[in-house]
Amino acid sequence: MRWLRTGKTLSIFLLLVLAASGIWQILRNRHAQSATSDVTNIHSLAVLPLENLSGDPSQDYFADGMTDELITTLGQMRSVRVISRTSVLQYRAIHKTLPQIGRELKVDAIVEGTVVRSSERVRITAQLIQASEDKHLWAQSYEGDLKDVLALQRDIAEAIAKQIRMTLGQQEQVRTSIEHPINIEAYESYLKGEYFLNRFAADSVHKAADYFQRAIEQDPNYVAAYTKLAGSYEILGQMGVIPKKVGHPKAMLLVGKALELNPEFAAAHAVRGWGLLQYDLDFATAGAEFKRAVELNPSGVEGHEGLADYYATVGRVQQAVQEMELAREVDPHGSIVNYDLCLMLYFARRYDAAIAQCKATLDLERRSAVTFWQLGEIYAAKGMDSEAASAFIQAEELWGIPPPRIAAFQSGNRDSALGERFKTSLQLLGEDIDSREKDPLNVAVAYTYAGNTNKALSWLGRAFEVRAYGITYLGVDPTFDRLRPDPRFVLLLRRIGLPATQS
């Protein structure tokens, strides 16, 4: 079934909360050296993971946090496309030449550096390199007390901006999310929260939430901590660790506090947009929040991705595709963004392009069950039942479905059309399907393919009531095209607030 619905939304929430970073202020500059060069042609940039040279692997979280901060800070500048964290993370400890990395990421320049932390002292080096020629354009080294570390990011970002000959006007000025001296213990708690959030398992997200809560208690004005705690609650709700009706209100209160403290914090607007879109079904306000996130951070993938989902929700599928393509420009190797582009092409009924995009996504992540499942849906929409059944089986094998069930599905595939394999799936679930903890939208999909309209509509109603992920796509999702003539389906669209047609 469509387990991808839950998996995708968790990935999105992870993506956007990872973008919620507290940006640093200035350390004392002890050493500096720079090279003079004409770098006016630099319009795209990648920040490689900063290397931890402390000799202590337990300090990896510190270097990771500094990398995230620098990406977010530089991403505010409109004239430069900054590659997202997801796409650069793969280059950690990978020995490729900088020209090769530049070609793979399609960037003009690369920032790389190191972090050394010893007791209460920190030393950071950073250098700007013209990727195509592996030519050093600028390098600086900073050293100071740990309590002053929050100042570093803006200093490096402004130095880089100066070197690529930008004019930082009012709208181009790199900003920090923390305009006051921060408690260093709060900062440590925040970075540890990020570290556990990146592991993306139920227990690690729960632990991350505890650290973000601790950071807020240590510094009640910590904007980024409020934002990431809000995102953590949304993720825990999607994971079923806490009820959505409990987690979502908490998340909205937290993100409201973040925006009260800093109305120009892009990631907070994105988090709020997702809550409004998926749970509150306030589509117009959600769209405005995503647009504001993109305006504040043009290189923030979470804003572009959220805006694409908003456009899909309201039936503007061509704009959804265009916005997701913008998201891919800043996250070219991210499997989430590439999968989502496949999804948007599916919604736009551009099936051949969607198949090609799904295959490209599988080149990035060969064991992506959600992508195989999406590929199956596209084949089904094209009437290619045999190819669809094969793709569905591959997805289910990757999800660990027991072999006897896989064999039963394969038998159903041989017997007749695609609908038989879903009838078999529903039979295997048994008569107690109502008591099972199944995503109602997944069950609705199975009944739709099986040709049972009454059951499909009943389960779609349940999906609406619990705000199952994907219910906002109902107006454009080709999976449910066979239900569209039914007046009950049209009524459900109206209840959700969705248009009946796409543009």
Image (cartoon, rainbow, N blue to C red):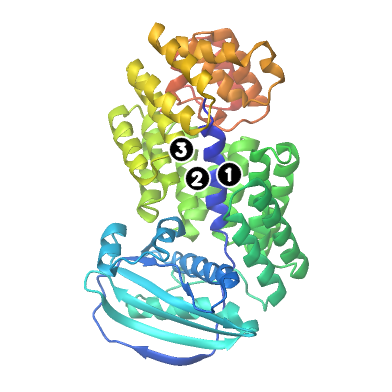
Whole-Å distance between the Cαs marked 2 and 3? 9 Å
The type of residue carrying mark 2 is Gly
N-terminal-most mark, 2 or 1: 1
The type of residue carrying mark 1 is Trp
Image location of residue 65, percent across then percent down: 55, 68
N-terminal-most mark, 3 or 1: 1
Q: Using the rendered image of the protein, determine whether residue 483 is visible from the camera's viewpoint.
A: no
The residue beneath circle 1 is: 274
**Left or right for 193, reference 102:** right
Cβ atoms at labels 2 and 1 below 8 Å apart: yes
Name the mark nearer the viewer: 2 or 3: 2
Identify the residue at the far bottom of this view: 30
Residue 153, which numbered label?
Answer: none
Vertical position of residue 289 compared to residue 116: above or below: above
**Left or right for 173, reference 469:** left
The type of residue carrying mark 3 is Tyr
Q: Quadrant of the C terminus?
A: top left
The residue beneath circle 2 is: 306
